[in-house]
Image (cartoon, grey):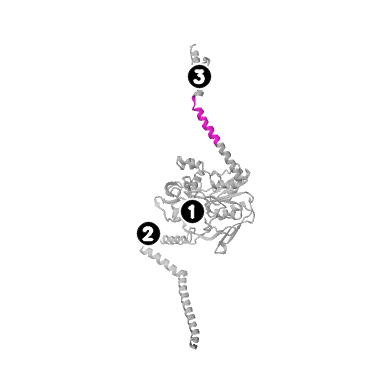
Amino acid sequence: MLQDKAARPIFHWLVVVALLVNLAYGAKVYSDAVSQEDDPHANLDLFINVLERIRRDYVDGSDLTYQDLVHGALEGMLSKLDPHSEFMPPVKYTHLKEDTEGNFGGVGVHINIQDGYLTVLAPMEDTPAYEAGVMSGDRFVKIEGENVRNISMPEAMKKLRGKPGSKVEVTLFRPSTGKNIDVTLKRALIKVATVKDINNQRMFEVDENKIGYVRITQFGEETARDLEEALKKLELEGMKGLVLDLRHNPGGLLDQAVKVSEKFLAKGELIVTTEGRRKGENAKHKSSGRSARPELPLVVLVNGYSASASEIVAGCMKDLERAQIVGEKTFGKGSVQKILPLTGQEGAALRLTTAKYYTPSHEVIHGKGIEPNHKISMTRRDQELLFLARTPGGLKMVEKDRREDVENFEDPQLAKAMELLVGKEKIREQAEKKKKAKLEKESKQEEKPEKEANPEKKAEPKEDSKEEPKVDPESEEETEEKPE
């Protein structure tokens, strides 16, 4: 028994030593693995070895330049991070700068890669794509006869853009119909007007209830200024409430989203917070109070294609209870991309996600989107009818038997917005009044053809008049001929 007692401490120490040895060995193995993963020299050696092997052994390696391979590697590297980070060669970077300035040559579509498909987020107003009937949600199947499944964004931009006046043939798949559509688009110099009224113009008139309507198609450099002009026009007409339509708005510049938001907020209100890894990426954007209308009744319309800057505005208005949000959950693109020009690479740059947006209540936008206060869904058919109804010449894009559907389409999300601003009872009374007036008008139009279709009643006075020789035309003619 004494021997057992003496052996126990020795056994315990042996177990401890074994565990420590095992831990040390495991730590070394792990450390070696981690150091190899994070060793830049080892991994750069691997990259160079692969680069040279491709140049030496690939069947068409003689046609590849080092720049081709390195640019391809960079594109792949950035695409692995998230859908919004990318390497931009000089052509792509030039396109981005032209987009931001709102003046460039192309067909006029906002596009993104969704599930491997090049997808239209929204057609730009008054552009070749818009006039040809390209719609949000359409997927590019072919460009100039080439299959574009899994195409990269830079390649897509290169194919779609070109000299103004030149043409590009595309095949689109439209989910609402399940059919492919062949479209020939004539490239043009794209000048983007981002603030429109309900008739796609810039007249900005209030309706019978003194409610204004403004649609922002995207957030460009002049959006806040153009919105201010629109609001002043509506105020001159006695505006008592406003519908701000951000549906199918793919986003744009952060500073413009802030300036648009602060037009409806008192001074010092938090609009959006950006947070990233670096201290410089952390910022809080608050309203300045300049040209503000904090008391104006406001409803914001959004849908699944409202993204980025649109979500900043909607999220701010919702969190601060400044406006009612109507429609469907937004896209969920709430990250900040910084453009970083690359030294030693003339004209090239990185678009890198460096931070995320947070609403005033510190809710993340990215991957979640903004839920509306009043969820009013629209089917793909409704979306198509809305697009056609507010597109100049939209009726010409559909067959004759469907044109009545377009003319009679009532936008359910806009109708809800008007109900919130005006009141359900008043809207109902006005709708009944209009319906009654329409029925009376149709009734009068139906009675008129019936009267014209009955010749007997109109013929009776003529028959009576023939009995009186004084008004008989034939008698008069005979009387005139006698003197000759």
In the current view of this chain or complex, which residue is farthest to the front?
1
Toward the viewer: 415 or 145? 415
Q: Residues within 10 Å of mark 2 (few under 14, many from 20)?
A: few
Mark 1 or mark 2, which is nearer the start of the sequence?
2
Q: Amino acid at mark 2?
A: Asp
Residue 63: mark: 2
Point out residue 346 in the picture as x, y percentages from the top left corner. 48, 59
Note whether 280 is above or below 180 in the view shown: below
Say if residue 479 shows up in the picture: yes
Point out residue 205 in the picture as x, y percentages from the top left corner. 59, 43
Q: Residues within 10 Å of mark 3 (few under 14, many from 20)?
A: few
Q: Amino acid at mark 3?
A: Glu
Mark 3 or mark 2, which is nearer the start of the sequence?
2
| Disc 3: which residue | 463
Instruction: Compute the Cα span from label 1 to label 3.
Output: 80 Å
Toward the viewer: 100 or 116? 116
Give the residues in magenta.
439-455
| Disc 1: which residue | 95
Point out residue 474 in the picture as x, y percentages from the top left corner. 48, 16
